[in-house]
Amino acid sequence: MNGPTVTSNGRPGTGLDQQKLVQSLLLVVVSVLVLGPVLVLIRTSLAPSEAMPFETLDFTLKHYAQLLQSPRTISLMWNTVVYALSSMTIGVAIATAIAWCTERTDMPGRTIVRILMFAWMMVPALVIGFGWILLLNPGNGALNVLFRELFGYLQPILTIYSFWSLIIITSFAVVPTGFVMISGLLRNMDPNLELAARVHGGSSWATLTRVTLPVLTPGLFSIGIYMFMAVVQAFDLPLIIGLSADVPVLSTRVYLLSSPDNGLPNYGLAASFGVLLLVLAAGLMWAYMRAIRLGERFRVVTGKAYRPKRITLGLWRFAAIGFTFSYCAAMMLPLLILLWVSLLPHYSTPSLSAFGGLSFDTYRRLLTNPMISRAIGNTIILVISSATIVMLISCLIGWFTVRSNSRAGKILDALSFLPMAIPPIVLVLAILLLYLNTPLYGTIWILVLGHMTIYISFGVRTMSSALIQLHKELGDAALISGASWLTSLQKVTFPLVWPQILNGWLWVFAHSARDLTVPLMLMTTSNIVAASTLWNLWQFPDLPGAAALAMLLMTALLAVVVPSQLYVSSRLER
């Protein structure tokens, strides 16, 4: 262990004892969080159908045989790969074009685009999906009704319930995340490479295709793998759109087997599909990490000025504005229709005659409903507890990862990274099986446990990146002055990286609030939260109530996250 260990009481080794104790506790906690569910998942896939994983010592390969022999498995794999690959390709292409217009050209409105992209990252996929259903539903979708009234179409010309609708809506949903990642690549690219091409007579198009894109290719490749992996693991949009469109994918298959509408759950087969999805995700994670390592060879940021010069678009700026703000308009439409529906007592498409019925009665009805009040209270507990505990554990693991050369520190780093390779639907199924017969099941704390397990990878990666920039002498100075190891962390180390801690806290806070996988898989009458209540209202159906709750959830997220992120950004720029 690095650093002095003398503390204020003068007894050498006390700081080392504190570190060993905390490290041991972290190993136990992270092992239970991560390894426990994985082992239970594998055990369940090998257990007889009629038994829970801990009820018998028998093993069987029947579930894997059923999975491999079923023709539906090939169809599920094909749907999953085509869905993820198509959504990723379209989403990354749109994100790259918008990021290039925003970061490398003089297109007007760049700041507005950045703010909108950041805000849309906080909008739950569930909300976006519901909005598009209200717009494109074949019978009474707002756009189909509009086209019918304007052009007299007898049959709807648009439908939400198709494979390509699912792909396009998913690709739109992943663009903001892709934009943020690709903008960093473009912003930090060395301009001397493009300048040299222009000096030697290269046109803007030749420079873009022969210099800019080849240099960006490794970064775009790694981002593409990451986005592909994210879509493979997606659950919300395949659930609310894909099932109705009869386009099953692996994530929805796992959910339906473990939570069927009729009959008993088939946990064994669900677990075997979960293991299959886990293997696929692990392969993608390996490819992603390899792409990142290969990308290190193409670093083009130097210690000198590397701010690229903006390209003057001229008349092409109108095409750039049209493309960029067409996407922005497409993202605004589902939110606007949800806002419209939330202000009506019953669902009705937008019209002048319906304006007289607009009111906030639905919001008042929701906020005075005891079930909604309980869901809001549970949501507050869930998001604050999940974010706080995740970042507390992540700060400690990050310190051991960066400062410790011990085997325990490396094991902690590997264990905390493992959930990144486990699809959330698989992880939650394993958590369900592990805690089904314990006092935790049915409480809000099992949801907190689920989010801790899923988001700890992000927290540790965030804090490791922040702590690696600090020289260890800063903490050692406090130890030499008589502070204990924990006091040194509290008073010296963590205050220096508080922007990253707050950033990570806000990220977990927002994703915990918008997540549907954990609340839906582990839902009981006593642990409902905003996301699961939103799903229940939609299924009831109470469309105005679902729309109003969606707007409340989205507004609350934006009100907390956006100002805090802007504040952190302003502090970091000083």
Image: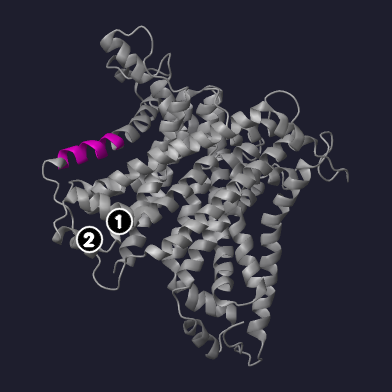
Question: Residue 413, percent across and down?
Answer: 60, 65
Mark 1 and mark 2: span between their CA atoms? 8 Å
Q: Is residue 318 above or below residue 204?
A: above
Q: Secondary structure at mark 1?
A: helix
State the quadrant of the N terminus: bottom right
352 or 515: nearer the viewer? 515
182 or 482: nearer the viewer? 182
Q: Residue furthest left?
A: 314
Q: Which residues are magenta?
A: 317-327
Give the number of marks: 2
- The amino acid marked with disc number 1 is Leu
Residue appearing at x 72%, y 44% in the figure: 441
- The amino acid marked with disc number 2 is Pro
Residue appearing at x 53%, y 42% in the figure: 515
Say few, some or many: other residues with alpha carbon within 10 Å of mark 1 (under 14 / 14 to 19 / 20 or more).
many
State the quadrant of the C terminus: bottom left
What's the magenta bit mostly, secondary-structure-wise? helix
Q: Residue furthest front?
A: 200
Does 232 lie within the magenta span?
no
Question: Residue 360, percent across and down?
Answer: 39, 28
Does 326 lie within the magenta span?
yes
Question: Residue 292, percent across and down?
Answer: 46, 59
Q: Is residue 357 left or right of residue 409?
A: left
Residue appearing at x 48%, y 44% in the figure: 228
Q: Is residue 167 left or right of residue 17?
A: left
**Which comes before the other along the chain, label 1 or label 2?**
1
Task: Provide the residue designation for mark 2.
Answer: 308
Residue 373 appears in the figure: no
Task: Provide the residue designation for mark 1.
Answer: 186
